[in-house]
Amino acid sequence: MSDSPKNTYRKNYEHEYDPKSKVDALAMDLELKLSDTMTDRNLVEMRMVEDLRNYNGIYDPETLKAIKENDGCQAFIKLTKAKTNAGKAQLIDLLFPNDDKNWGIDPTPDPDLAAMVEDEETPFREGDFQFKDQQGNIVSRSQVAKRKQAMVDEACDKMRQKIDDQLVETRYNAKSRRIIHDACVVGSGVVKGPVVLGKTDKVYLNTPEGFQQVLKHSFVPGCEVVRPWDFFPDMSASTIEEAEFVFERRFLSRKQVRNLPRRRGFDRDRVKKLLAMTAQQTQHRSTYMDDIRTLAGLSDTLNDTRFETWEYHGPIAREVLEELEVIEPMDEEHEDYQDEIDAVVFYCGGIVLGAKLSLMEYSQAMPYRVFCWEPDDACIFGYGIPRSVRDEQSIINAFWRMMVDNGAITSGPQLGIRKDRVKPRSGEDWKLRPKKLWELNGNVQDIKQAMSAFEFNNHIADLSSVYQVARVLFDEVSGVPMLQQGEQGPASQTLGGMSMLMNAANTVRREQVKYWDDHITTPLISDFYHFNMEHSDDNEIKGDFQIQARGTSALLIKEQVAQAMTNFINTAGNSEVFRPVLALKATEILREWAKTQQLPKSIIPTEDELKAYHKQQEESAGQPSDPAIVVEQMRQQGQQAKMAFEKELAQQKHQMDMSELHLSAQTKQQEIAASMQANESAERIEVMKLAQAKQINTEKLLTELEKIRTRNQLEWDKFMAEVRIKQNAGQTANYGLE
């Protein structure tokens, strides 16, 4: 591989261009612009290669060659990959919560309509005509405004559902995860949309001959992931909004190229001219691109049998589009006349295959959106986690190799040998192995005269301390602390301390989530909304709406907010003052609390279910009843309340009696135990006195003491048996006190 960037990527094709053809002139202009863009992007490609190597744990060829020449350790500690995956996983978790979308759409506020809603007194008129309802009542401005608002809300809900279905169809969440992966690894992730995607469904129709399969073709809006190494924007721009043009590389098989004329806008003769070339003739060779493709698990361009096609988005001269029959000719004096028009051109091998106008006016003038893990103020491409920790990863690798190499050298002694005094047994080499025989030469009496052993100093402990410092530095520089990887480290064990630490650890993620909201969610969803407004045939979904990005709100649905909401419910719910106020928003509060606990929405009643429940309660409360039945119900309720009260009193009295009885039994039990112990002590003292007076011998003394112990144990067992009878059978007993 050569690290010197090429000056130009411009290819010289064998075509004969028509100097009078504006389309051939466009092909030459596109090739020149493309080669200049590829040259300007050389440094970005070098950066991508280095970042991919660090992420995959691969040394660059020069470093690996030096290590092999010194016979050193080739281990690569893949901390960069672990940190990158941790940062990616956390950002995905924040941006795409399982229980909610990270975007919303609401009607644009109308101050005039809001004022009409509050005006309940003024009748609604149009000129001199006074509106009335079916009962002949005068319709107020408030009633009309509420009806308009309901219609707007209904259309907004349908638009929201329409966009959501389109995003699900195009697998927006899965593609967004790929974009975030690219941004974390190489610094930039690119999404393209909305674009029209062809869709083929298999439909089975019931015919007299049975079910038959029919292919149904349709076109739906969607989005696509553009890999960073296939994305060539205007390198003079610092943001995608400033870019004048964009080249996107696409690789097509020969079969796909042959099928291009079936699509509108592709010229059959030009496609046939392209098929006369080989795939390699259309490819722009790049050693950096070969490295990127190899690290990504793809074959290099030398062995690639696909055609390298380009999709150009940018200004095109009107004359060219007229020659391609994309637009109709227009007089220069017309008020809508423009010398250049934004269009899309498909280009391959120095041949313009076709062109079309841009699908719509995009929010950022291009269908491309770029997300960067760490934005670069001077370039569209940003920096990823591997770029941030590149030096720290090199330090860790270097010290780990030192530790392994030093450990290998100091694991055993080194030998010095005088070959004129000793040699291995015939037929063997000089390598050391167990039970090897050596032959001494001449007058050597001791093997030590021919061999001497010595050892080098072991420095693993010193190197390990430096390695640990590098690990801490790596953790700080990466911006993904250990706490976000599931490792607590020196964090506080208390709930409040953990909440504070998690809140601090999420500070950087908040900024990145907001960046995603501003540069991906808001413009992309807005363009889906505008696409449906322009191209949808369903007028019921159309209206004046605005997009709300909700990525940052996902940060709030976390432990500290869940705890705060729980405390709020407990505190306000136990207050006599605030409890009636909370009842007005009980359903909303319960729904938000369930969301913080990540509980399913199905456990909370919907608005329709609540309305049905309230209606049922009102109907049951409003039904007239027979006075006799009402009196009888009241009498039965009173009787039930009286019985419940008497039962509760009886239970309380029984519990009090049992407590007193149990306490009395414990007191008497203690008194009897003390009395029996005192009697036993007194009897022992008397027996001991007799023994001192020589009236009984030692053997008889032991016998008397055993009798006393046995008698007392028998009395105690009898007493405890009566206690158990009292507790189990509930009968009166004297507890052995008589």
Image: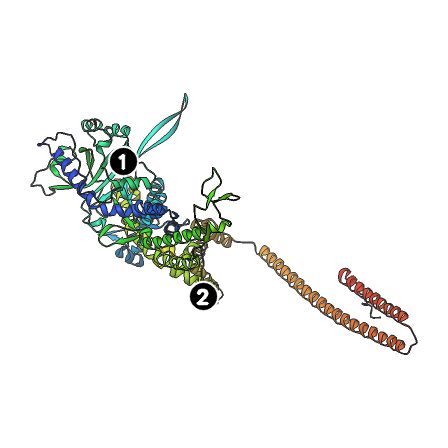
Q: Are marks 1 and 2 in contact (CB under 8 Å)?
A: no
Q: Which is nearer the eye, 427 or 342?
A: 427
Q: Quadrant of the C terminus?
A: bottom right
- Left or right for 113, reference 340: right
Query: What's the amino acid at mark 1?
Result: Thr
Residue that label 2 marks:
578
Residue extending furthest top? 209
With respect to residue 374, does 730 lie above or below?
Answer: below
Query: What's the amino acid at mark 2?
Result: Phe
How are the colours assigned in the image?
A: rainbow
Residue that label 1 marks:
301
Q: Where is residue 534 in the image (x, y as percent from the top left)?
A: 24, 42
- Left or right for 307, reference 400: left
- Left or right for 269, reference 580: left
Q: Which mark is residue 1?
A: none
Q: Which is nearer the eye, 447 or 534?
A: 447
Q: In which quarter of the image is the N terminus?
A: top left
Please name the residue shown 67% across and 66% down the image: 652
Query: Neighbour class for label 1 at 10 Å: few (<14), some, many (≥20)?
Result: many
Q: Where is residue 509 in the image (x, y as percent from the top left)?
A: 35, 56
Q: In which quarter of the image is residue 277?
A: top left
User: How many circles with numbers are drawn on the protein?
Assistant: 2
Residue 645 visible within the image:
yes
Circle 1 sits in a helix, a strand or a loop, which is it? helix
Q: Where is residue 293 in the image (x, y as percent from the top left)?
A: 30, 40
Residue extending furthest front? 443
Q: Position of residue 180 (x, y in %)?
A: 34, 48
